[in-house]
Amino acid sequence: MLMEGKTIQVAAIEPGLYELVFANRDDSVNKLNQATMAELQQAVSTLSDQDDLRGLLIRSDKDSFIVGADITEFVGLFSAGEEEITTGLKQMNAIFNSIEDLPCPTVAAINGVALGGGFELCLACDYRVMTSNAKVGLPEVKLGIYPGWGGTVRLPRLIGVDNANEWICGGSEQRAKNALQVGAVDAVVEPELLRDGALDLLRGCIAGEFDYAARRTEKQSPIKLNQVEQMMAFESAKGMIGAKAGPHYPAPLTALTSIQKHANMTRDDALSVEAKGFAKLATNAVTPALVGLFLKDQQIKRTTKRYEANAEPVRQAAVLGAGIMGGGVAYQSASRGTPILMKDINEDALQLGLSEASKLFNKQLERGRLDGRKMAASLARIRPTLSYGDFGNVDLVVEAVVENPKIKQSVLAEVESHLPEGAILTSNTSTISITELAKALKKPENFCGMHFFNPVHQMPLVEVIRGEQSSDAAIARTVAYAKAMGKTPIVVNDCPGFLVNRILFPYFAGFTGLLRDGADYRQIDKVMERFGWPMGPAFLLDVVGIDTAHHAGSVLAAGYPDRMGKDDETVIDRLYQLQRLGQKNGKGFYSYEPDRKGKPKKLIDEALPALLEGVVGPAREFSDDEIIARMMIPLCIEAVRCLEDGIAETAAEVDMGLVYGIGLPPFRGGALFYIDQMGLQAFCDLADQHADLGKLYQPTDKMRAMAAAGQTYFG
């Protein structure tokens, strides 16, 4: 053994042929943290001192090559300023350059995933061999930055500007077939042949069969496009990438600009351009928000794993109620491999549910994400039924009938009698107390909430609601099933509205209050969409359904009368009374008609102002800042209340619930992060300017105490 560190080992395979193995003793995966980078520098220095060095293989002894840089270590560097960030990047790049400059051919053997800095390390090698089931990629733009260890320099010179723009600015993981097709890797082999295949390539280089020196020179030289070709490649990409990224996410366009700036430079000068652009992005306000979301997501995944470790898997599921929601649940379960019974009381409803699932599978077929054989197999996992005959083998049931407590209690009590011992019963309710619903059951310990968000196949969040008698086993198994369905489950405690809806409806209260005081709903929508929401509150209410919002609002008003109760009629009440239910019947705040693809097209309804007389005040102007404050203050304060009341266990779960559940703009980082960025004292001062609007606008005592002490929700 030439070197044996905590994360890296170096040994001779045969005279002159060495392998550098990433073998982290303390973790199940390899990461490029500061300790690993120090060992990598030592390993390359040791190899350079070997007089017989003829070739180097770099591989991993884990299930994956390298999952990327350890962002928890490097995030501290982002607050140090551009100059220190640039200096740090130069130090890291010196290590990768030393690998690229070794006086021998180098081959990276890629298994599992090689992402971010892990893939940039591979790019520093002369050749890359990849297993057929592995993935590579540069996902840094999803964190608000771009590749800073040579990725923007080496990849365009290796696979061409157009392909590199797509890889870097899109940030998506790439499968082996595509990586080979564009030239990002040089060979794809089956997993068991990886080391031997990489060694064969390395020996071929040593024997002169492959000109590794020419390959190396190409990566270190200017991009081989003339000025006209460069202009066409970069300028055409700017429009598409800018439109896709939007105004709030600067990383993709900054990456593109950086590549364009260093296109005519050799490696070292190009790396300096890359480092300066990276440093500017790293100090942008968006970056800590997106990095924070990544860390919060990792925290939630760790929590989920703890639940999964104590859970029996769900081998057979069932859904009660075969409407759009039931069909969506059935689709999601079947598409992820868990068979599911879909029960309803009439044949027409079953056909509706099957039609919904089939429609979703057909979309996947049209997009090439599955073939006809896989589609048929997935559809076969959904079994429609009008009876409880097969429920003796069911492990978990999702009740998804109408949002009425009496009906739900009746259905839940009925199905409970048909389930085997230990089966878990869940209710997909958005507002009704799980503790109250459990009163109809003989075994309330086997019951909890499982709140999906509509549309099920698109929304990543599932709220798992713990009632007063829900057992740990019931919660764990429900979390495990949600995870198996490809969802992000967050466990919350029972209360009116649970976590997400409880926080969302104060936001709607801010909206109805603005209309009461004379604001234009169309202006509010535009302002909040520019703020970053995928749709403004009026449009969102139309999509949710005015009837759904009216019902949920009534539940929350009863649950929190001091701040969500209302004495006067609101615009939501008026629209519900007029049966303008939104997209579901073509009229709400807006009117809707099908476009060429059959999707509802939003139109201004000139008849609406007259219909809202008496609940909308005399028109007056509001500034954008005033609209944002009146919309966001009640949402943020209620998010704090949910944390203080223990509805969610951590601030991370509160913020991720809002991002995944209602589309709170990711670049804002979440409601609690939004408060942190503003400063808790500044937020309280802003709220105090609106205190006359009621308790929704009044910070809690704990918020004021934290503000006085200079505390934050996230360190």
Image: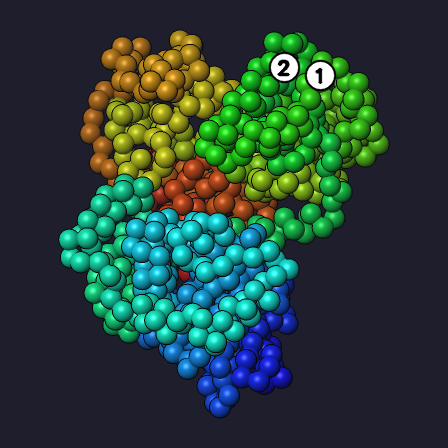
Name the residue carrying label 2.
Answer: 350
Specify the label residue 385 is tagged with: 1
Helix, strand or loop for disc 2: helix
Q: Amino acid at mark 1?
A: Thr
Relative to 7, residue 140 above or below: above
In percent of width and height, residue 51 lies at 49, 90
The three-letter amino acid code for the residue at tag 2 is Leu
Please indicate whether residue 89 sits to the left or right of residue 38 in the image.
left
Q: Residue at x 22, y 45 (%)?
A: 236
Task: Determine whether the residue tagged by mark 1 lies in a helix, strand or loop.
Answer: strand
**Lower sequence index among marks 2 and 1:** 2
Relative depth, front residue between 248 and 35: 35
Determine if residue 554 is in view. Answer: no
Q: Residue at x 51, y 68 (%)?
A: 201
Q: Which residue corresponds to the image point at 64% horizontal and 72% vertical from the top-left?
A: 25
Of 324 and 208, which appears nearest the observer?
208
Marks 2 & 1, CB-CB < 8 Å contact: yes
